[in-house]
Amino acid sequence: MKDFNDEMQRDHSRKFNVHAWSEHKAVKKLVNKIFNSFTIDDQEMLVPTSNNKGKSDSLKQLRTTLADLYVGWKTDPTLCTGISRNNNDYKPKSRYNALHIPKKITKVFDVLCEYKYLDIIKGAYNPEKPWLSRTTRYRPTELLQSLFNEIAISQYEINLRYKEECIILRDKDPDDQKEKKAKDIEYIDTPETCSMRLEVQAYNKLMLEHYVDLPTLQVPYIIREEKTKFGHPSQKLYPVDQLHKFTRRIFSRNSWELNGRWNGGFWQNLPKHMRRDIFIDNEPTDEIDYSGLHPSILALENGFRLTGDRYDMERQVSSNIHPSHQREVIKKLVLICINAKTKQKAFKAFHNKHSGYKNDDLEVLLDAFVAKHPYLESSLCSDQGISLMNIDSKITTHIINQFVALDIPILSIHDSYIVKLKDTGLLRSAMSVACIEVLGADIEAEARTKKDLEYLKYATTWRSMDRDFYLDTFKHLTHFEKCIEYGDRYKEWKKWKGI
């Protein structure tokens, strides 16, 4: 066994899923075959025990491990799987661990390595530079890949979300004073949480029956360049397939009145320019969002109604920021300020995501926005975002429930929604009804197709001054080409569904 394999790429990886499961007889047969290849001592070591129930299913952990590894291999044979060895990540009695997977699952990976089923790159923790820390990575060897080839089942035979909880309550970990990460915390069910769970489960059941993909995507994943919270660049892989449509509602700060947004569908990880390529059931889509939802809600709370473009100052505010970029910078800055507790924290958060701007210029832009909307000044940099997310989550819930009742697919990205082109009229109506029900007033909504035309017109205006900006905009809004791989994925899914 190698501690490091030059052919493995540590950053080309995905996280191990403790909710992977399959009842397919081929998977069970594979699990038995591999388990029987272990010595008696190793078999006994892997048999989990409990304090009062004696021995439980000795093959459950191995089946979860192999099911998840199989999906990773089907996604990309070169893809690694990262697994944490932190005891806090395995709580068998937690509602967030439906299969009751214990820390001993790491022993399963160790034994699979010992028997040459997996290659490994060992993890390492760097206390001085935490952003350089890495979990241990594994990848099927040729031996395990040959066994995977033998079972030859569709990845859709694997359930990556078996009994997974879809109503999540989080809070900052009081014992983690350094990083102050939010952790999933336990709670006692109430009629309200049970009702919310039924709503999310109904939506997830609906989306299992519909195919969501990007015809332009050759591989079923994307790799995004991101920055860690320490400001360091990093690459992250996001699956784009039918096994990653599972959606949850996540509440924050140990309160059912904070956050509550619908999260989880792979479409939420796509860059904005890629979302226009989404097809549902092999049909083109459109995206409609509320015009500046959070500022609009804050304005309504102060007795005002926002109209027109909230972020267009109709003049160049700062000489250091090109007019072609000004609106987008103001929009991003304002949304960060709504979520931040102080202006200093807002500027720091902005710099972490967008480099090349000075605080003085950001100050000027923010002052211009406040001058245009003075009634919003007290709402900026006052930690309003988490409460506004709860309001927009209620709006989203209302909209999704309307579509579920009609058995029509819909994708949400917090305050915007993607539907088939033929369903845009229904979506507009649902968005209007939801706003009136939740806020007592309607809020303007704009379709992506309309915004694309307006943005292209905007880019054309600045063509002579910034031709690269114009060309990039034109390319993003007009380029579209279906690939063969998309067709193959869609055919496989239809075959599995018997369509």
Image: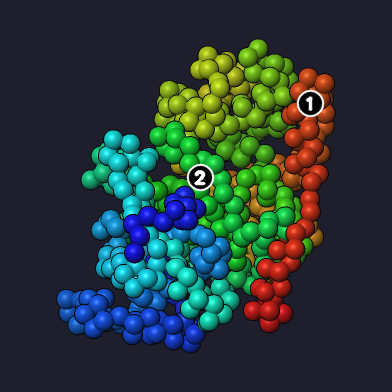
* Residue ID for mark 2: 235
Q: Residues within 10 Å of mark 1 (few under 14, many from 20)?
A: few
Q: Quadrant of residue 464?
A: top right
Is residue 263 visible in the rendered structure shown here? Answer: no
**Residue 467, numbered label:** 1
Amino acid bearing label 1 = Arg
269 lies left or right of 277: left
As helix, strand or loop, the secondary structure at mark 1 comes to: helix
Q: Is residue 67 left or right of residue 38?
A: right
Task: Kindly tell me whether residue 179 is visible in this rendering.
Answer: yes
Residue 185 tag number? none
Considering only vertical position in the picture, is 227 above or below 153?
above
Q: CA distance from mark 2 to mark 1?
A: 29 Å
In contact (CB < 8 Å): disc 2 and disc 1? no
Residue type at tag 2: Gln
For the N terminus, the image quarter is bottom left
Determine whether 61 is above or below 380 in the image. Answer: below
Residue at 71% of width from left, 73% of height from top? 491
Q: Nearer the viewer, residue 33 or 221?
A: 33
* Mark 2 Cα-neighbour bin, 10 Å: few <14, some 14–19, many ≥20: some
Query: Where is residue 415 drawn, in percent x and y?
Result: 61, 47
Question: Which residue occupies 29% across, 58% down?
Answer: 85
**Where residue 4 sits in the image (x, y, percent)?**
37, 55
**Identity of the residue drawn at 54% across and 41% down:** 225
Q: Answer with mark 2 or mark 1, whichever residue precedes in sequence.
A: 2
Say whether residue 153 is left or right of residue 442. left
- Secondary structure, mark 2, is strand
